[in-house]
Image: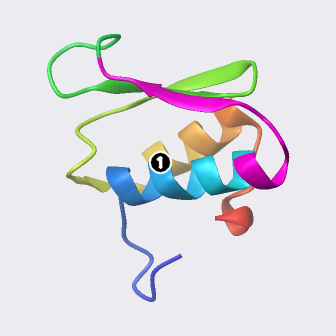
Amino acid sequence: MSDTGIVRGNEFIRRVQAIAKERHLPSRVDEKRGKGSHVTLYFGDRRTVVRNPKDELKTGTLHAMCKQLGIDKADL
């Protein structure tokens, strides 16, 4: 994770995809499934919605997305 603890949506997606590769799980981003700038991130058989990947993620949002994907925030 970055030194300041601030994570952008794109960075979160890259890290989740790296974890998926390590764990031999499929992962993909579906830009068509979501309104406006939102995208859906699939991690194995789980999914979460990432709001505007260019923006910073708030702490609560980051925790909720990690919980939905079944990963620990420390793994990022």
User: Which residue is outermost to the left?
Assistant: 36
**31 sits to left or right of 2:** left
Give the residue pinned by disc 1.
13
Q: How is the image coloured?
A: rainbow
Magenta-colored stretch includes residue 50: no
Q: Residue at x 28, y 44 (%)?
A: 53
Percent position of residue 61, x then y: 45, 44
**65 sits to left or right of 40:** right
Q: Is residue 54 above or below residue 32?
A: below
- Foreground pick, 50 / 14: 14
Q: Is residue 75 above or below residue 58?
A: below
Q: Is residue 44 above or below residue 57?
A: above
Q: How many marks?
A: 1
- Foreground pick, 13 / 58: 13
Q: Is residue 9 above or below residue 46?
A: below
Q: Quadrant of residue 56?
A: bottom left
**53 sits to left or right of 70:** left
Q: Residue at x 35, y 50 (%)?
A: 9
Kind of residue sitting beneath label 1: Ile
Percent position of residue 43, x then y: 66, 31
Quadrant including the C terminus: bottom right
Q: Residue at x 79, y 35 (%)?
A: 25
Magenta-colored stretch includes residue 30: yes
Q: Quadrant of residue 22?
A: bottom right
For the magenta stretch, what is the residue range?
A: 21-31
Tag 1's secondary structure? helix
Percent position of residue 75, x then y: 73, 64
**36 sits to left or right of 53:** left
How crowded pointer 1 is (Cα within 10 Å; few <14, some 14-19, many 20+) is rated as some
- Foreground pick, 46 / 74: 46
User: Which residue is outermost to the bottom?
Assistant: 3
